[in-house]
Image: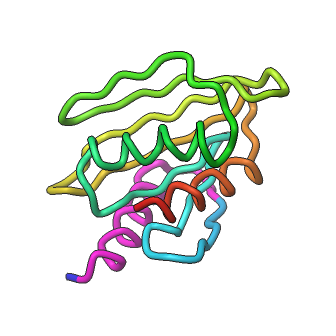
Amino acid sequence: MHPAKKLVLLIGLSIAVSGCAAVIVGGAAAGGTYAYLKGEMQTAYPHGVKTVFNAAVAALQDDMGVAVQDKTCDLTDGLINAVRADGNKVKVRLKLVGADVTEVRVRVGTIGDKTWSQLYLDKLTKRL
């Protein structure tokens, strides 16, 4: 199956399993279909956790100008805690959900920021 189809299927399944309404936001490239649910934007990429993690850190620091405070990553999970210039905290969680498929979840503050999260994931997608 084509990687882009796998991503769409994965996101669709995660929304169906959640039992809650979600907003699907289309991006520009494969891995650019995002689900926004309960203040958190999520997508999946056809890459391993380490590859996505490195791109995620670079997109935060270099593309978005966000200060990374703490970051951890292993073969199956990653976590990045950062703070935007306006003081809002950013949490990026990564999880291996299949063979070289990594789910990324982004939350800004306590209630989320859909526009900023989509812009960040667009920057991350370009780095992959």
Residue 11, x across and y down, in percent: 43, 62
Identify which residue, 125 or 62, lies in the foreground: 62
In the rendered structure, the answer to whether residue 78 lies left or right of residue 43 reads left
Please give the name of the residue rendered at 29% of the width and 32% of the height, measured from the top-left corner.
77
Judge whether 66 appears above or below 35 on screen: above
In the rendered structure, the answer to whether residue 43 lies left or right of residue 115 reads left
In the rendered structure, the answer to whether residue 17 lies left or right of residue 24 reads left
On the image, which quarter does residue 111 sit in? top right
On the image, which quarter does residue 62 sit in? top right
Q: Main secondary structure of the magenta part?
A: helix
Residue 65, x across and y down, in percent: 69, 38
62 magenta-colored? no
- Magenta part of the chain: 2-22
Please give the name of the residue rendered at 68% of the width and 56% of the height, measured from the top-left corner.
119
Identify which residue, 77 or 60, lies in the foreground: 60
Please give the name of the residue rendered at 59% of the width and 37% of the height, measured from the top-left corner.
61
Residue 37, x across and y down, in percent: 62, 48
Residue 6, x across and y down, in percent: 30, 72
Image quarter (top left, top right, bottom left or bottom right) of the C terminus: bottom left
